[in-house]
Amino acid sequence: MKILAFSDLHRDRAAALAILEASRAADVVVGAGDFATRGEGLSETFDILAAIAAPVVFVAGNHDDLAAMKASASGWADAHVLHGEGAAIRGVPFFGLGFEIPAGANHAWNQRLRETEAEDLLADCPEHAVLVTHSPPFGVADLQRTGEHDGSRAVLAAVTRRKPRLHLCGHIHHAWGMTGTIGSCPVHNLGPRVQWFDV
């Protein structure tokens, strides 16, 4: 299975068009959150991505309205907007969890979860799935500009426990392009560019 993956488009029309063009060669397209910016612009980004013919797996970022995402994608042929839930595509299990973890700034637009909430929502992640989260796991691909780790301990625990075959995330802009492993699981902080993975 050939996966095209990205995160954090933040209303970037050129990046969305590049994703759409590349998606012609994909078996699955994964978007790890932040299609909008501060709660605005989701529809204009989704209007472009709606032309993707391959199955899509999206999670909501901290800038995204989850209900609006689900409503916008409801008419797509094979779209899965996952938040504490999974989907099987061509026999491969995917599991997704959105939002900022741990909970950060208390802005009205900032969609966030406490670590305990994230732990509960990750409990049903099947073993050896492709795990898609907006926030990275603590200690891997999660460095801020200050050099401090700012990922989620709940996500780290889920990866350690459930042993996904691949973990795709975003959120921390300084960490775009960073990779690592947890056990045998590759972890990739994506960013707004075309990236390919085989599972």
Image (cartoon, rainbow, N blue to C red):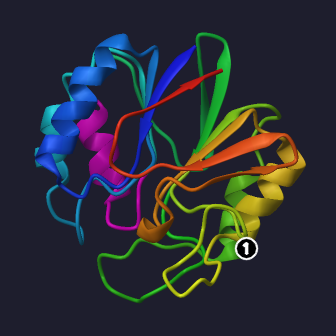
The residue shown at (29%, 76%) is 109
Q: Residue at x 21, y 32 (%)?
A: 18
Residue 135 placement, left or right of 68 = right
Q: Residue beneath label 1, please?
A: 116
Task: List x then y, in percent, for residue 54.
Answer: 36, 16
Q: Is residue 50 above or below residue 191?
A: above
Q: Is residue 26 magenta?
A: no
Q: State the image coordinates of residue 31 (x, y, percent, origin top left).
A: 41, 41
Q: Which residues are magenta?
A: 60-74
Residue 90, position in %: x, y?
59, 10
Which quarter of the figure is the N terminus placed in?
A: top right
Q: Is residue 77 visible?
A: yes
SS class of the residue under badge 1? Answer: helix
Left or right of residue 81: residue 68: left
Q: Where is the C terminus found, in terms of image quarters?
A: top right
Q: In the picture shown, does residue 144 fall above or below 36?
A: below
Residues 71 and 142: in front is 142
Q: Identify the residue at image location x=40%, y=67%.
A: 62
Q: Position of residue 69 (x, y in %)?
A: 31, 47
Residue at left 61%, top 77%? Answer: 150
